[in-house]
Amino acid sequence: MTTSTIAATSGLPKSRYTVLGCIVALILLIAAPWFVYPVFVMKLMCYALFAAAFNLVMGYAGLLSLGHAAFLGIGAYLTGYAIKAWGVDPLLGIGFSVIVAALIGSVMGALAIRRKGIEFAMITLALSQVISFIAHQAPFTGGEDGLQGIARGYLLGLVNLRDPIAIYAFVLVLFILGMFVVWRTINSPFGHILLAIREQEDRAVSLGYTVSRYKLTVFIISAMLAALAGAMKVLVFQNASLDDVSFHLSGLVVLMALLGGIGTFFGPLIGAGIVVALESVLATSDLPTPVLTGTVFVLCVLLFRRGVVGEMAEYVRKRTSDTTGEAESGISGQEKLFHEPILTL
């Protein structure tokens, strides 16, 4: 199994489609505040980055983390506390929370990555509950009330983040930077090796790769991106609560990735959009949100195993292969006679 073979068959987005999709997405995000409630779009970007961070671990390393909300909560609580209690610049608060998330992620990852499957999932769940307990009991988190009234302040002492356009632009820039890290990770030799480990771990070991090191590295990168998503969220909503470290949120990000397509670049973004839109619609109705969310999860697992993006990619692949097959097998007799001179020119 070579790196080039993995890249060709892994489901990584083709470069031209990726570039086109990124351009379209960027145009839509820039234009969105004039057509959609800006807070909704910013919330979507926060959860999309969170889902993309989770997808790095699940989709490309094959590790199911059931405690990823812990890292989003770390980003939210520490950024909010640093801004509110210490009065630091928002960028410093974000940097502080991302670094702490990397340190905690390295500890959690070191404890969990030597296990596989359900054992890995249970370890991450247990460790995330420790973070949730700390968020509930630590005096600086505000307990059940959480952190409230977090001022956005001035970015680098110059840009007033209280301005709706300024905060939207800042969140958009952070989102783009985070997604660039995701894209660069999965489209690098490191990302190709992750796919090799996911598909045939024993063979990767036999080729001399230190599997645990690669798993730990991607787990730390994912933790940092999840913390960045939490930092973005706290700047948007100006509060951090126990919901940010809850198991419900850890399960929700699994749903986002599954809906959009595990192991695809745009899948988690699409999945996050569906979930956030569904929550917004259900918030104004009397329908039971958890029941409907669970129903969507079950239907996705049963009917759309590849997710929205995965199913679309499979459909295009089949159509392309069918067309190619028809072109190769459908030329016979007189048609072949007329085609041959042209093909040999």
Image (cartoon, rainbow, N blue to C red):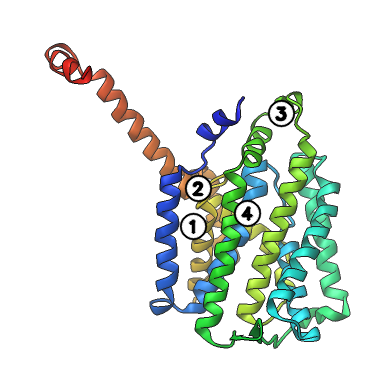
Badge 4 element: helix
Q: Amino acid at mark 1?
A: Ile
The residue pinned by badge 2 equals 307
Instruction: Report the residue at 60% width, 42% height from top.
Output: 188
Spatial CA span between label 1 and label 2: 9 Å
The residue pinned by badge 4 equals 254
Label 4: how many Cα within 10 Å (few below 14, some 14–19, many 20+): many
Instruction: Report the residue at 56% width, 51% height from top.
Output: 183
Which mark lies nearer to you, 4 or 1?
A: 1
Q: Is residue 326 above or below residue 215?
A: above
The residue pinned by badge 1 equals 270
Where residue 240 sits, quadrant-wise, is bottom right
Instruction: Report the residue at 44% width, 64% height from top.
Output: 26
Badge 2 element: helix
Q: Are marks 4 and 1 in contact (CB under 8 Å)?
A: no
**In x, y percent, where is residue 278?**
50, 66
Spatial CA span between label 4 and label 3: 26 Å
Q: Quadrant of the N terminus?
A: top right
Q: Is residue 147 above or below residue 326?
A: below
